[in-house]
Structure formats: C-alpha cells, structure tokens
Image (cartoon, grey):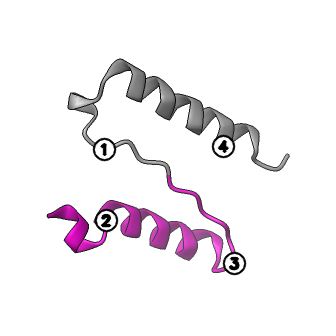
Amino acid sequence: MAWAMGDPPRKVVTRYLRALCGRGVRIRYHARYHMNVATRDQLERFALRVEDAMHRLPR
C-alpha cells in the first residue's frame, strides 16, 4: 500500500534538502525498508551499496 502513496519518506527528505540546499542540488536517497525482517545478507549488501555511494561523492 505504501507504493500507492509514492514513498512519502523519500519525498519529504528530498524536498527538504532541495529547499535547504537549492534546486540544482543532486540528491541520492538510500533507504532500507523493513529492516526488522531483512536477512543479514540483505543488510550487508545494502551497507556495501551505501559505502560505494559515499566513495563516489566529490571531494
């Protein structure tokens, strides 16, 4: 049912960041929903994806 609402947490966070930082800012939103039922392997893959995204940030 949450998909029908269009992912409200993502919308709220990204809109706030654009308002705070400016319209042209590039925003990447990494979310891991349902962590209470995720397997260890799924959580580790998510952590690796986030780590990879952090390494790609401009310095």
Amino acid at dot 2: Asp
- Gap in angstroms between the C-alphas marked 1 and 3: 27 Å
- Of the numbered discs 2 and 1, the one sitting upstream in the chain is 2
**Position of residue 8 in the picture relative to residue 42 (left or right):** left
Q: Residues within 10 Å of mark 3 (few under 14, many from 20)?
A: few
- Gap in angstroms between the C-alphas marked 3 and 2: 22 Å
* Position in image of residue 17 (x %, y %): 53, 66
Residue found at the very far right of the displayed protein: 59
Amino acid at dot 4: Ala
* Position in image of residue 11 (x %, y %): 39, 69
- Of the numbered discs 3 and 4, the one sitting upstream in the chain is 3
| Residue indicated by mark 2 | 7
| Residue indicated by mark 4 | 53
- Gap in angstroms between the C-alphas marked 1 and 4: 18 Å
Instruction: Answer above or below: position of 55 versus 3.
Output: above
Amino acid at dot 1: Tyr
Q: Which residue is more in the foreground, 8 or 45? A: 45
Residue found at the very far top of the displayed protein: 40
- Gap in angstroms between the C-alphas marked 2 and 1: 11 Å
Q: Secondary structure at mark 2?
A: loop
Residue displayed at 43% across by 63% down = 13
Contact check, label 1 and label 3, Cβ < 8 Å:
no
**Position of residue 44 in the picture relative to residue 27 (left or right):** left
Residue displayed at 82% across by 50% down = 58
Residue displayed at 30% across by 44% down = 33
Q: Secondary structure at mark 3?
A: loop
* Residue 24's disc number: 3
| Residue indicated by mark 1 | 33
Amino acid at dot 3: Gly
What residue range appears in magenta? 1-29
25 drawn magenta: yes
